[in-house]
Structure formats: C-alpha cells, structure tokens
Amino acid sequence: MLFLDGVGIGKKDPDVNPFLTARLPALRSLFDGELPTLRNRRLSSRYALVFPLDSTCGIPGLPQSGTGQTSLFTGENGPGLIGKHFGPYPYSALKPVIEEKNIFRRLLQAGKSPYFANAFPQRFFDYAKLHKSRLTVTTLSCLYAGVPLLRAEDLRAGRGLSADITNAGWRQLGYPDIAPIEPAEAGRRLARLTANHDFVLFEYWKTDHAGHSQSMNEAIHVLEVFDSMLVGVIEGLDIQSTLLIITSDHGNIEDISTKSHTRNPVPVVLFGHRFDEVASLLQGSGRRPANLSKVTPALLRFLLP
C-alpha cells in the first residue's frame, strides 16, 4: 500500500492541477495513458482500476489528516465519531479507536505480518519521547500494535525507505554515510519487501507539503519522484499474487490555487491480484459513495479470506 498524503482528484485544468503537467508515465501506464479528473473519476484497464473515495466521510468541513487517516487505517469513520474534522494529529478521543482497530494490530492478531516500510532518523525517536501527542496515525498505530519503527540501520540495509524516497535528506540529518538512491531502486526495494510480509505500507508526505506550498514546480517534482519510484514497484511486483493499492486521506496537491486542503474525493488505485474483487468490497452496494473508512475492512477481507 502506497499512502500519499494530501492527494485528491482534481479539475481537468493544468494551470492548477500538477498531475496534468507532471511527467507520470508509470501512473499513466496503468490506465492506458489517462489519469482521473473530476470530469472522469473512474478509469479501468486490464489489471487496474481507479475510482473516488469520499474524503469528508459525510461530515461538513475540510478534511484533515488526523481524522482522515483514522478512517483510512482503522475502518472507523474518524470525523463521524467526533463530529468534526481534526488534524494533523489524531484527536485524543480517537486514540483508543486507533489502538484497538488499526490495521497493523488486526493483522497481527490474525497471524499475519504487517510492515511499515518508512525508516526514521534518531531525532524522530528523541522527539517522540517528548511529544507523544504529536504522532501521526501511522506511527501511533505501529507503536500501539508493537510493529517496530525502522531506523537508519534498516535504511542502510535496504529493509526500509526514506520518507523522501531518495535518501536525499539524510545527510542533513546527520547521516553522511547514507547515500542517495534513484527512485526506481527505492521502488524495487519496496517491492522486495512483499516477499516476506503480508502487508507493506509506505507513506509519502511530501505531496501534502507541496500542496500547501502552492508551488507548481515543487508539486511537479514530488509527483515525478513518486512516479519514478512507482516504476520500480511495478517492475518488482508479481501481480499474479500481489495487490498494489494507492490512496490518500484528503485532497490538496491536486489544486495549487488554494493553500488549504480540499473537499475533493481522493483516488484509490488498485493494481494486480484480485483488484476487481477488492474494488467491489470498497464500493459496496449502497447508494452513498464509498469513503475512507471502507479501505481497512476491504483489505482485511482480501488478506484474511
């Protein structure tokens, strides 16, 4: 699972939507050269499908990461439980839900092997000791579930990925021996992790940062780095036995005309093994559009037949 922070489905307008300006051959290859827009939200091909998820989860206001990620990674309607959107960190009343219902814990309880592929520098662990209330849903879920957070030695050994994909920022973090790598190599490393783990998650937050910057150049850059990583992921995956899912928690980067988040739906991309079956689980049979809280239940059904 590739979790992209702050990525919605945007207008068919290259002046504000960097997806329409950036070079994204890997992502486009999944859908015969097309990308979803608000005019055409659903695309399909032989092995892949993309369609929208409601990022508001039926609650008025601008979606936020704390509640959106709670919905995404627990299967519970985060903003619905507290009656509002909240972020970037999870609302205190949602922490017991995250502790009990997060996908890492539920997979471990079922005898599966979940893996969070992001590696963190020492300064993150030092910060976390002092500021436990300022942990994201993903890191908090791992700590609650007992899933180890990866460190610099895991990154060196190829067991984890840098949050920036290329390792470019680690020298400034005090690790001059960690050399930059090409994004495609990062993708191949990520694909190799699926050989030993039932569920592998990688989180890319630079998309949200670029959206807040309102810089088209930055937005294009982070999307193209991600797409180059996706090349390696696609090359390394056995789609006869592995499913790739790409999704987000709320919109942002798809509309750089605004500094804030958007109410746009977020895309969910499904590629590979049983993708159509998982799509059916996500969409259900109800009249209301599928929302973020459908993702974890669908993945659990996929992984725990």
Image: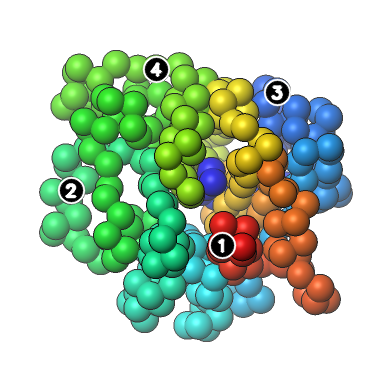
Along the polypeptide, which appears first: circle 2 or circle 3? 3
Residue at left offset 34%, top offset 22%: 168
Q: Give the structural element (helix, strand or loop) at label 1.
A: loop
**Pointer 4 and pointer 1: residues touching (CB < 8 Å)?**
no
Local crowd size for mark 3, using a 10 Å CA cut-off: few (<14), some (14–19), many (≥20)? some
> What residue would you read off at disc 4?
181
Which residue bears the numbered disc 1?
Answer: 304
Residue 53 lies in quadrant: bottom right
Q: Residue at x 75, y 56 (%)?
A: 277
Whether label 4 touches label 3, CB < 8 Å: no
Residue 125 image label? 2
3 or 1: tag closer to the N-terminus? 3
Is residue 42 positioned above or below 224 on the image?
Answer: below
Nearer-N-terminus badge (1/2) = 2
Q: CA distance from mark 3 to mark 1?
A: 33 Å
* Camera-nearest residue between 264 and 78: 78
Q: Check disc 3 and report the residue beneath it.
A: 25
